[in-house]
Image (spheres, rainbow, N blue to C red):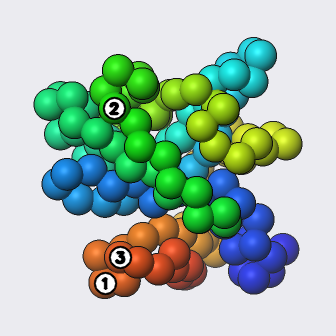
Amino acid sequence: MDWTAAYEILQKYAFKIETPLGFGTGFHFAFNADKKGVAIATALHVVEHANEWRQPIKLTQELTGKIIHLEATERAILIDRDRDSAAIVFDATALSQFEAPLELAPEKSRLKIGFAGGWFGYPALAPQNLCFFHGAI
């Protein structure tokens, strides 16, 4: 798959995550069994302060532009401090429906040195734009 095709696929799952202290990127990666709950993966440092202080989180769905405001009582945040990762879990009716979540690599998989990889998100150098970079691992 070329990088343009990868971008086209990924943007369907991308969210800009904003908190009172900053912003970051998230990706829809899971539903619960009845598809009434949805999970957005992000880096823990993006949502940690908002989670600890029970502050609101704003999600903007990249493809549709739909904005979702989640108060602390409307979400759960699952945390993995060792991997600086988190999952924001909330009611799926708040956003446009997906056919299936973004498929993730197996948990214990590793990329070899020299593997071509891409980075997709909202960097500090262009916070209003969903950006895509690529290079070698």
Local SS, label 3: loop
User: Would residue 51 be visible to someone looking at this image?
Assistant: yes
Amino acid type, label 1:
Leu
Classify 137 as above or below 16.
below
Amino acid type, label 3:
Pro
Q: Nearer the viewer, mark 1 or mark 2?
A: 2
Q: Residues within 10 Å of mark 2 (few under 14, many from 20)?
A: some
Q: Residue at x 34, y 32 (%)?
A: 71
Q: Nearer the viewer, mark 2 or mark 3?
A: 2
Amino acid type, label 2:
Glu
Q: Nearer the viewer, mark 3 or mark 1?
A: 3
Residue that badge 2 annotates: 71
Are the residues at dot 3 and dot 1 in contact (C-beta closer than 8 Å)? yes
Position of residue 108 in the picture relative to residue 50 (left or right): right
Local SS, label 1: loop
Residue 135: x and y, percent? 55, 81
Q: CA distance from mark 1 to mark 2?
A: 28 Å
Looking at marks 1 and 2 on the same chain, the residue that comes earlier in the sequence is marked by 2
Residue that badge 1 annotates: 125
Q: CA distance from mark 2 to mark 3?
A: 23 Å
> Mark on residue 127?
3
Q: Residue at x 31, y 84 (%)?
A: 125
